[in-house]
Amino acid sequence: MSALKKTYVLKLYVAGNTPNSVRALKTLKNILENEFQGVYALKVIDVLKSPQLAEEDKILATPTLSKILPPPVRKIIGDLSDREKVLIGLDLLYEELSEEESDRG
């Protein structure tokens, strides 16, 4: 692994074990394993058990994925079923598109 690789720090806010929460976690883990391969830290926060954490981070809806590092902080609300939207939100797809464009030039 190169030292230049970014480490992603993510928080997934869920409200209990609802179908949307389960789907969001499953989808996110799939994306992380395929795209980030070990360069991430994920913390799952159940807002029903830790409402103060959700309040501190201004989480108004669940599920919400919050990318803490690398900056800027980004939030994605929903069950994360739109893979492209998640990758854009995590700044991963944009980087891939930029690399493809520079390869062509």
Image: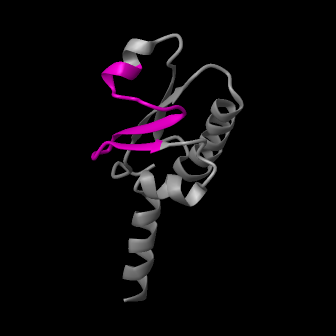
> Which range of residues does the magenta coloring cover?
54-76
The image's colour scheme reads one colour
Rendered residue at 52%/40% (across/down): 38
Q: Quadrant location of the C terminus?
A: bottom left
Marker count (numbered): 0
Residue 85 lies, in percent from the top left, at 52, 57
Left or right, residue 26 beside residue 40: right
Residue 26 lies, in percent from the top left, at 67, 37
Quarter where residue 17 is shown: top right
Give the farthest residue toward the left: 72
Q: Nearer the viewer, residue 47 or 41?
A: 47
Rendered residue at 33%/40% (across/down): 69
Quarter where residue 73 is shown: top left
Q: Is residue 56 magenta?
A: yes
Rendered residue at 57%/22% (across/down): 15
Q: Is residue 47 above or below residue 24?
A: above
Q: Nearer the viewer, residue 95 or 81?
A: 81
Q: Is residue 65 above or below residue 103?
A: above
Residue 27 lies, in percent from the top left, at 65, 43
Give the farthest residue toward the right: 19
Give the farthest residue toward the front: 60
Rendered residue at 45%/77% (across/down): 100
Left or right, residue 30 beside residue 43: right
Q: Is residue 77 magenta?
A: no
Residue 52 lies, in percent from the top left, at 38, 13
Q: Is residue 74 above or below residue 22?
A: below
Give the farthest residue toward the top: 49
Q: Nearer the viewer, residue 44 or 79?
A: 79
